[in-house]
Image (cartoon, grey):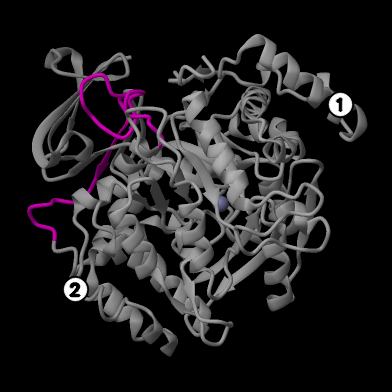
């Protein structure tokens, strides 16, 4: 691979305190380096352009059984977004649930080079990897769902945290995932009995543990195992009026846990916070309580969030929170899928159309923006849409423009429901505009920091970092983002260059190369006798309850073409 110099661009690399500086970025053997000989290198002239590290997606649903069920359920969605095959590219389909090829190409066109699938039902992990392996260009990783695991809940009930650590390690290895993920903890098991858990201190049937106990125990385990990211949590009570109290109770449930690694303060990452920041008592008086979340994040370091920004239009919702999808189905009466994943978790899917004429949707739209505008430290909040739930990820350029242009927000607010008065967007957020440095944080730097992937070379451009770079057609010296949001949208929709591992993969918004990336996995070490004791319990679950033989359960190594084992920093208790 030829060396490369990206010359004279304005570089935004917030993790290295470079807030828009004219400098060259050199890449050798796929990594950023100090200097190279220009005569041997590919030279990219980035004068008058914006240069950022490759984008990092911290939370999206892009691969696996749930995504595929959504595709089968919505053939109309496939038709709405079809793009014929090109010289190099495979045919693309989907307007909210993309096929695997479209997923890789569309992210790359926006300058994204690293993607994380946010919810893998353990039993169905093989399917997730089959699809991740077909997504071109990006490096990838996945989060395994441990929220309603029967043996896990039994261990928590009995106070057997050591065995819970061994169980978590086994599931991470068996599913080839790298983050412990929790959706509606305890609530999905309750949903199997037609119930749900709304408060963090309610008990799930039979197992008699609470969401607070589940999260506290797994947070402890997460720190003992030395996993790079904190536990990743979709709080209970998603999407219901007045749910902000449950969200804050969830944050407080792990407040006593100390970080196991010195390079991370966060104990819990609360995903798609927009869906968890509602006041009011019913669908008629629902209002924004984003301020409660903002104040909490501004004054606490043990919780970080991503936006879950909702955008108006048609999309598909899919989540392991099966009970919540049933509620949505009752409201909308649209087609619906419900699924139980034996002994582990559940899921639901329905199509949605978010409308600016609907009071609730207007409040939801405002809340995501409020969170990003009002949280002071932009390394505690990441840009997401919980793709495809609140909007497809292809809406990111519009969201960036909304955050950078109060003029654009003011214009849109004229066409939405009067419930906008129940939000902070017209008042407290008036006139606030994010800078390109802020955008570089919330689209890549923050994600890499929260996932602890900075040392692994993601989200920044210091020597040693991956040669993942995006060049956008924005001249910061001439940009008046507030007045020209369309320029921002066009620039972030189609990068002039996306470079992945030192190779140009997108030029002028078109895919020009489709290399296959790595898959990040975690393999925690566990004491042998502890592991043996845990396996006796797990074997019993397989013999009596699972429909799958234990030997056939783990994803075989051959499913991953290019696995990359991430280094862990376990605390001494389990090392
Ligand atoms: Zn999600």
Image location (x, y in percent) of residue 256: 44, 43
Q: Is residue 89 above or below residue 166?
A: below
Extreme-front residue of the structure: 159
Instruction: Say if residue 101 shows up in the picture.
Output: no
Image location (x, y in percent) of residue 87: 50, 35
Residue labelled with disc 1:
540
Residue 236 placement: quadrant: bottom right
User: Is the C-beta of the residue carrying label 2 under 8 Å from the nearest atom of ligand 1?
Assistant: no
Closer to the camera in the image, 469 or 520: 520
Closer to the camera in the image, 480 or 361: 361
Give the class, few, some or many, for how many residues have Cα within 10 Å of label 1's Cα (few <14, many ≥20): few
User: Is the C-beta of the residue carrying label 1 under 8 Å from the nearest atom of ligand 1?
Assistant: no
For the point 50% across and 26% down, the residue is: 224
Closer to the camera in the image, 461 or 467: 461
Q: Secondary structure at mark 2?
A: loop
Extreme-right residue of the structure: 544
Image location (x, y in percent) of residue 570: 47, 20
Q: Which residues lie in the magenta part?
A: 451-479
Task: Look at the image and say whether residue 472 sits in the magenta stretch.
Answer: yes
Give the class, few, some or many, for how many residues have Cα within 10 Å of label 2's Cα (few <14, many ≥20): some
Task: Look at the image and say whether residue 151 sits in the magenta stretch.
Answer: no
**Pointers 1 and 2 in contact (C-beta within 8 Å):** no
* Lateral position of residue 574 relative to residue 320, left or right: left
For the point 57% across and 37% down, the residue is: 218
Q: How many labels, in total?
A: 2
Instruction: Say if residue 354 shows up in the picture.
Output: yes
Q: Secondary structure at mark 1?
A: helix
Residue 418 placement: quadrant: bottom left
Residue labelled with disc 2:
431
Q: Is residue 233 above or below residue 480?
A: above
| Quarter occupied by the N terminus | top left
């Amino acid at each position: 691979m030829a060396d490369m110099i990206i010359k004279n661009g304005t570089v935004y690399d917030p993790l290295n305190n470079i807030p828009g500086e004219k400098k060259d970025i050199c890449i050798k053997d796929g990594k950023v380096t100090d200097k190279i000989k220009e005569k041997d290198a590919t030279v990219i002239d980035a004068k008058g352009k914006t240069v950022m590290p490759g984008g990092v997606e911290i939370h999206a649903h892009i691969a696996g059984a749930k995504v595929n069920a959504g595709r089968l359920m919505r053939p109309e969605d496939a038709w709405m977004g079809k793009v014929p095959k090109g010289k190099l590219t495979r045919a693309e389909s989907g307007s909210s649930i993309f096929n695997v090829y479209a997923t890789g190409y569309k992210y790359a066109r926006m300058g994204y080079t690293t993607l994380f699938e946010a919810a893998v039902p353990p039993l169905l992990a093989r399917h997730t990897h089959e699809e991740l392996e077909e997504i071109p260009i990006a490096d990838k990783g996945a989060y395994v769902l441990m929220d309603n695991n029967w043996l896990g809940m039994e261990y928590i009930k009995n106070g057997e945290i050591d065995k819970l650590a061994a169980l978590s390690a086994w599931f991470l290895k068996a599913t080839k995932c790298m983050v412990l993920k929790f959706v509606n903890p305890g609530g999905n098991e309750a949903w199997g009995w037609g119930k749900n858990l709304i408060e963090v201190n309610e008990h799930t049937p039979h197992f008699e543990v609470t969401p607070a106990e589940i999260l506290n125990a797994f947070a402890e385990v997460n720190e003992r195992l030395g996993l790079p990211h904190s536990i990743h949590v979709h709080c209970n009570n998603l999407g219901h009026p007045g749910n902000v109290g449950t969200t804050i109770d969830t944050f407080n449930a792990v407040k006593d846990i100390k970080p196991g690694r010195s390079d991370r303060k966060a104990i819990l990452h609360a995903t798609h916070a927009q869906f968890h920041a509602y006041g009011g008592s019913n669908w008629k008086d629902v209002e924004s309580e984003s301020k409660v979340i903002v104040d909490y994040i501004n004054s606490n370091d043990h919780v970080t969030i991503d936006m879950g920004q909702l955008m108006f239009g048609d999309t598909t919702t899919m989540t392991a929170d099966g009970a919540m999808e049933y509620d949505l189905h009752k409201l909308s009466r649209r087609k619906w899928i419900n699924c139980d994943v034996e002994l582990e978790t559940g899921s639901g899917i329905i199509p949605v159309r978010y409308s600016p004429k609907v009071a609730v949707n207007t409040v939801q739209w405002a809340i995501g923006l409020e969170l990003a505008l009002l949280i002071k430290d932009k390394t505690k909040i990441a840009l997401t849409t919980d793709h495809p739930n609140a909007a497809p990820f292809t809406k990111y350029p519009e969201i960036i423009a909304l955050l950078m242009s109060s003029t654009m927000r003011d214009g849109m607010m004229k066409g939405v429901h009067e419930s906008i008065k129940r939000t902070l967007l017209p008042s407290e957020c008036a006139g606030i505009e994010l800078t390109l440095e802020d955008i570089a944080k919330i689209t890549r730097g923050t994600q890499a920091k929260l996932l602890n992937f900075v040392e692994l070379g993601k989200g920044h451009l210091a020597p040693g970092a991956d040669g993942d770079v995006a060049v956008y057609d924005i001249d910061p010296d001439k940009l008046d983002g507030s007045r020209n949001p369309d320029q921002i949208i066009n620039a972030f929709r189609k990068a002039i260059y996306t470079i992945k591992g030192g190779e140009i993969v997108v030029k002028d918004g078109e895919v020009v190369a489709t290399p296959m990336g790595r898959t990040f996995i975690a393999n925690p070490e566990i004491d042998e006798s502890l592991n043996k004791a845990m396996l006796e319990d797990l074997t019993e679950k397989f013999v009596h309850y699972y429909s799958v033989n234990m030997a056939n359960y783990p994803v075989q190594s051959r499913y991953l073409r290019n696995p990359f084992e991430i280094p862990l920093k376990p605390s001494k208790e389990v090392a």
